[in-house]
Image (spheres, rainbow, N blue to C red):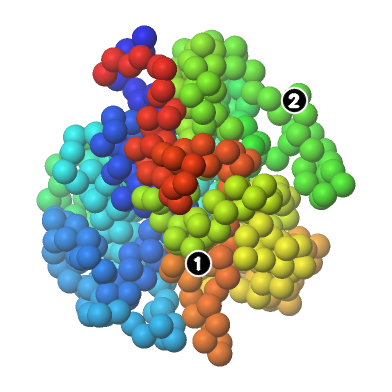
């Protein structure tokens, strides 16, 4: 019998906009933790508005934002009644920077507010938001926007988020916050930080906010122990993620070795010691191929509060993935031809990245390098220190000559892909390139994709819902909430 105020199932926060508000809302309405992806929400909002905001959800949520002048400014810049023409490019958003302008801050705050607000609309279930520690400069304003919408949980992985618990504490008190930036070539005495003052931003019109719970996404007990002891505020629990999960994976411990297919080799050292994690005394959820009722039962027997599941939800009806991608993946699963590869080079973030073979997205983009090299969104850019001491940005997925000119090592560019643009193409928000060509999708998935047909209500169905996933996972498990 499960009796806890914590959810048993955490729906993974898959970006960009795969875990959008309709999916999170559906899971939350089932009594579990629905999670929206916080990745690139400023770009997502701008492009949705340029498509005419079909259904009006963006404008409905923006109408509830407490500072209407900021909303009007965004609508005036980006909203196109009826939507842009298919051959027209999306208007670009400002690239992330260490000292964002007021317009950038407004867009970040409003976009994060909108996504959480819509996910929480019409029910009293729990809603979380997921961020990548690797994407640092939008984080402070993004967190504040989510907290304005009363977000219940913040989850963060792809790094060591030691400063986030204390930042949540200060934001809840409407106090100024700052975050140190990871800067290549920086010296110990350097102080590269990004700052946000919620009192200044709101002109003192917000007195206080609820402090959401913070869950760190980790892959080792050592990191869990360090975060529980040395973070600057309260860590409320952990998501323990294994290397079979989708998206970015932690690299193998020790020297990177590759198998015959060019994938990282994970061994016994990469299996988290759950006994150590359990001894910390904080709730934890297990992720990475735990998307079945049997695996959920196993997790509970091991002392976990439950599981985080991404892949099963990624291909359900409510997810943000384009319908044709979901249909194609399901057909490949039924035919036994689906293929997932852990690419150690694809992501500019430097973490291994799961790539699903689909519409040539693996065979062409991941292997032959045919995707155009470009960095016009900038979320996975790396900050570096110039010889004159100033801060600048480079991306190993940008044009090689430009990257090397900025002091980067040419070897670091080998095999890199523009993950930012590829992920937006997955959800129908891809940029229109020269000659009217569309940005190619770059689909990521966990190894569990091979079993998603088990969520179909009947063998003849062509789709399944988030409700089907939750009911399947909880089958045979008694709950008390």
* Mark 1 residue element: helix
Residue at 37% x, 41% y: name it: 466
Relative to residue 445, is residue 455 drawn left or right?
A: left
Decide: few, some or many residues near mark 2? Use Cα within 10 Å; few <14, some 14-19, many ≥20: few
Q: Is residue 210 visible?
A: yes
Say which quarter of the image contains residue 256: top right
Q: Which of 95 and 230 is in front in this view?
A: 95
Q: Nearer the viewer, residue 107 or 385?
A: 107
Residue 132 in the image: x percent, y percent?
Answer: 50, 47
Q: Mark 1 points at which residue?
A: 425
Residue at 59% x, 32% y: name it: 289
Nearer the viewer's eye, disc 2 or disc 1?
A: 1
Residue at 56% x, 87% y: name it: 434
Q: Name the residue under label 2.
A: 269
Residue 425 in the image: x percent, y percent?
Answer: 50, 67
Residue at 44% x, 86% y: name it: 87
* Mark 2 residue element: helix
Residue 194 in the image: x percent, y percent?
Answer: 43, 54
> Is 191 drawn above or below residue 441 in the view shown?
above
Q: Can residue 77 be seen in this view?
A: no
Residue 39 in the image: x percent, y percent?
Answer: 44, 54
Relative to residue 304, is residue 396 drawn left or right?
A: right
Decide: few, some or many residues near mark 1? Use Cα within 10 Å; few <14, some 14-19, many ≥20: many
Say which quarter of the image contains residue 331: bottom right
Q: Which of 104 and 342 is in front in this view?
A: 342
Q: Earlier in the sequence, mark 2 or mark 1?
A: 2
């Amino acid at each position: 019998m499960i009796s806890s105020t914590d959810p048993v199932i955490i729906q993974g926060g898959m970006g960009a906009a795969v875990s959008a508000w309709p999916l999170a809302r559906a899971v939350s309405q089932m009594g579990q933790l629905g999670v929206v992806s916080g990745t690139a929400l400023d770009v997502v909002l701008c492009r949705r508005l340029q498509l005419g905001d079909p259904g009006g959800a963006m404008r409905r949520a923006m109408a509830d934002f407490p500072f209407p002048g900021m909303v009007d400014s965004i609508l005036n810049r980006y909203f196109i009644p009826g939507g842009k023409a298919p051959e027209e490019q999306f208007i670009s958003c400002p690239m992330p920077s260490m000292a964002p302008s007021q317009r950038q801050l407004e867009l970040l705050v409003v976009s994060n507010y909108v996504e959480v607000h819509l996910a929480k609309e019409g029910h009293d279930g729990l809603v979380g938001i997921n961020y990548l520690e690797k994407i640092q400069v939008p984080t402070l304003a993004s967190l504040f926007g989510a907290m304005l919408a009363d977000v219940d949980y913040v989850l963060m992985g792809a790094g060591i988020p030691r400063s986030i618990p204390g930042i949540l504490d200060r934001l809840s008190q409407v106090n100024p916050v700052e975050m140190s930036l990871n800067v290549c070539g920086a010296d110990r005495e350097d102080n590269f930080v990004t700052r946000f003052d919620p009192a200044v931003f709101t002109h003192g019109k917000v007195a206080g906010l609820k402090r959401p719970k913070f869950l760190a996404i980790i892959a080792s007990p050592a990191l869990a122990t360090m975060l529980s002891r040395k973070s600057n505020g309260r860590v409320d629990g952990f998501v323990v993620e294994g290397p079979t999960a989708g998206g970015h994976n932690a690299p193998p411990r020790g020297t990177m070795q590759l198998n015959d297919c060019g994938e990282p080799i994970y061994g016994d050292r990469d299996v988290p010691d759950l006994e150590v994690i359990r001894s910390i005394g904080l709730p934890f959820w297990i992720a990475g191929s735990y998307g079945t009722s049997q695996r959920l039962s196993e997790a509970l027997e091991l002392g976990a509060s439950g599981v985080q599941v991404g892949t099963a939800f990624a291909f359900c009806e409510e997810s943000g993935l384009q319908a044709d991608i979901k249909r194609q993946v399901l057909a490949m699963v039924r035919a036994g031809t689906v293929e997932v590869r852990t690419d150690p080079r694809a992501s500019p973030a430097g973490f291994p990245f799961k790539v699903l073979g689909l519409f040539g997205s693996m065979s062409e983009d991941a292997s032959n390098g045919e995707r155009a090299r470009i960095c016009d969104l900038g979320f996975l850019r790396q900050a570096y220190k110039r010889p004159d001491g100033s801060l600048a940005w480079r991306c190993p997925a940008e044009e090689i000559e430009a990257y090397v000119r900025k002091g980067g090592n040419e070897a670091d560019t080998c095999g890199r892909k523009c993950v930012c643009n590829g992920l937006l193409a997955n959800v129908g928000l891809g940029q229109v390139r020269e000659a009217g060509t569309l940005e190619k999708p770059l689909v990521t998935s966990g190894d569990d994709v091979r079993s998603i047909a088990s969520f179909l209500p009947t063998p003849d169905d062509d789709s399944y819902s988030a409700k089907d996933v939750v009911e399947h996972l909880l089958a045979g498990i008694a709950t008390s909430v």
